[in-house]
Image (cartoon, helix red, strand yellow):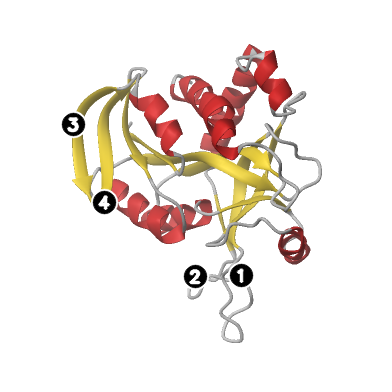
Amino acid sequence: MKTGIMSAMLEEMESLLEVMDITSTQEKGNRTYYSGMLWGHEVVLVFSRWGKVASATTATHLIIEHKVDRILFSGVAGALDPRLNVGDIVIGTKLYQHDMDARPIFPQFEIPLVHTSYFETDEDLRNQLKSAAISFLESNTIDEATKETFKIHHPKIMEGAIASGDRFISDAKDAEHIKQLLPDLLCVEMEGAAVAQVCSDYNIPFALIRTISDAADDNATIDFQAFVKEVATVYTHGILISFLNA
């Protein structure tokens, strides 16, 4: 079982590469694909870069050239659901493209010619991710000082819909507008739905996990780079250990 692991966060990839037994690397399309063993499991790691086009081309290359059996995407996201706080974990179920609008030919959000407005992730992979995330949170890996810095208190896991788009949502009005149009959304990011569409086309199991870094509005006050390094990267590292060894 070969797992393709994608991340939009370079820091997450670097953390995994430090513990990976790399057997080969490939430079293609301005990406570096690292093949080898991670905690005893065959993987291909790659930094997808940001946005739908970048992530879709990366996923396609993983499938066609590296012959991965499944793809996992990790990263951060901005919360839309008021129940979510910084440091919470979201496991995607349905993935929308909030900037897809081919009206009047197709309804808003519907992907042209595929007769759907979202793509579902793989249920078995979702369940494995949830179990791994539960184990990670129970391990209390994040130290108390870091939790206090980023106001992380009793982090939780939620499963639900996520929307992707080629816009960084940092305005409260934009966030509210998207939530009104797609009320079941938990959070927004910039890559997941594009990868889900590619995986659907090639019939490759796909799952996605996101750490909430902000509220997708203009009230975010955390140091984003510090959060990625001290929280999101630690989350990804710890969750993947349990996920791969499930």
Residue 168 can be seen, yes or no: yes
The amino acid sitting under disc 2 is Val
Q: Is residue 194 left or right of residue 98?
A: left
Q: Position of residue 52 (x, y in %)?
A: 46, 59
Marks 4 & 3, CB-CB < 8 Å contact: no
Measure how far apart labels 1 and 3 are at the Cα level: 40 Å
Q: Position of residue 176 (x, y in %)?
A: 77, 61
Work out whether mark 1 precedes mark 3 in sequence or the reverse, and give the earlier one: 3
Work out whether mark 4 precedes mark 2 in sequence or the reverse, and give the earlier one: 4
Question: Which residue in the protein does label 1 denote?
Answer: 109
Marks 4 & 1, CB-CB < 8 Å contact: no
Disc 2 crowd, CA 10 A, few/some/many (<14, 14-19, 20+):
few
Measure how far apart labels 3 and 2 are at the Cα level: 37 Å
- The residue located at (77%, 48%) in the rendering is 81
Work out whether mark 1 precedes mark 2 in sequence or the reverse, and give the earlier one: 1
What is the secondary structure assignment of the residue under circle 4? loop
Mark 4, mark 1: which one is toward the viewer? 4
- Return the mark for residue 30: 4
- The residue located at (60%, 15%) in the rendering is 141
Q: Position of residue 154 (x, y in %)?
A: 77, 23
The amino acid sitting under disc 1 is Phe
Measure how far apart labels 1 and 2 are at the Cα level: 12 Å
What is the secondary structure assignment of the residue under circle 3? strand
- The residue located at (67%, 55%) in the rendering is 170
Question: Which residue in the protein does label 3 denote?
Answer: 24
What is the secondary structure assignment of the residue under circle 2? loop
Mark 1, mark 2: which one is toward the viewer? 1
Question: Which residue in the protein does label 2 denote?
Answer: 114
Work out whether mark 3 precedes mark 2 in sequence or the reverse, and give the earlier one: 3
